[in-house]
Amino acid sequence: MKPSKTIVEPEWLARPSTEVAPALIGCTLVRQLPDGERLRGTIVETEAYEPGDPASHAYRRRTPRNQAMFGPPGTIYVYLIYGMYHCLNIVCDRPGVASAVLIRALQLEFMPPGLQKPEKLSRIAAGPGKLCRTLQIDRSLNDRPLQPQGPLWLEHRTPEFQQQLDQGTLSLVQTNRIGISLGTDLLWRWYLANNPAVSKF
């Protein structure tokens, strides 16, 4: 059976993260849980991290923690911050080049069953930590490939979404990254304008 044309293949990710990050806005992240349940959300906010970037985990050297960043495009890189929040990254470019995109926010299609949260649907994945908590993403997925029928994969923008971008009905905002102390001058964060699921304007 031929793979679906909607699936984002590793070859599509084999370019600098500064190109991939805005292109991922509007793509769908699919999380298949161990029980077979699938959660789907539209990516509405991303950040790029490149070689030579002082905010990158791989800025100084390769370590056991950042090893996944040097993997082939389509590798999942998950790290833990503050000892409690996981963050999901998609590795880009070429093997050996530490380039990745942080997925900062998703607009989920429906409220996951059993998730008792007072927040609105648009806010339960509005931020990298909240996204991973809602989709049950942790370090067990680190260094694994994006793969259809696996725990995580990506699907391309729908034709309708792309048409709205082309017509200007939807637009992307490019600005500086947040939550970092170095590389704050780099305009490597993108988000979907006026979308309620964006983590922070």
Image (spheres, rainbow, N blue to C red):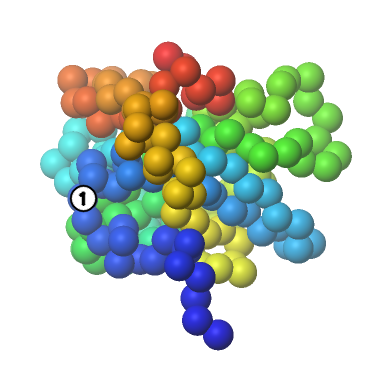
Seen in the image, is 124 located left or right of residue 182?
A: right
Seen in the image, is 58 located left or right of residue 67?
A: left
Image quadrant where residue 115 sits: top right
Q: What secondary structure is found at the residue carrying circle 1?
A: loop
Q: Quadrant of the C terminus?
A: top left
Confirm whether residue 84 shows in the render.
Answer: no
Task: Name the foreground residue: 36 vs 183.
Answer: 36
Query: Which residue is located at x 29 percent, y 47 percent?
Result: 20
Task: Name the foreground residue: 181 vs 21.
Answer: 21
Q: Quadrant of the N terminus?
A: bottom right
Q: Label 1 belongs to which residue? A: 16
Percent from the top left, x then y, of residue 47?
34, 35
Task: Name the foreground residue: 137 vs 40.
Answer: 40
Percent from the top left, x then y, of residue 69?
32, 54
Percent from the top left, x then y, of residue 130?
60, 31
Confirm whether residue 53 shows in the render.
Answer: yes
Seen in the image, is 119 located left or right of residue 67?
A: right
Query: Which residue is located at x 23 percent, y 41 percent?
Result: 18
Q: Residues within 10 Å of mark 1 (few under 14, many from 20)?
A: many
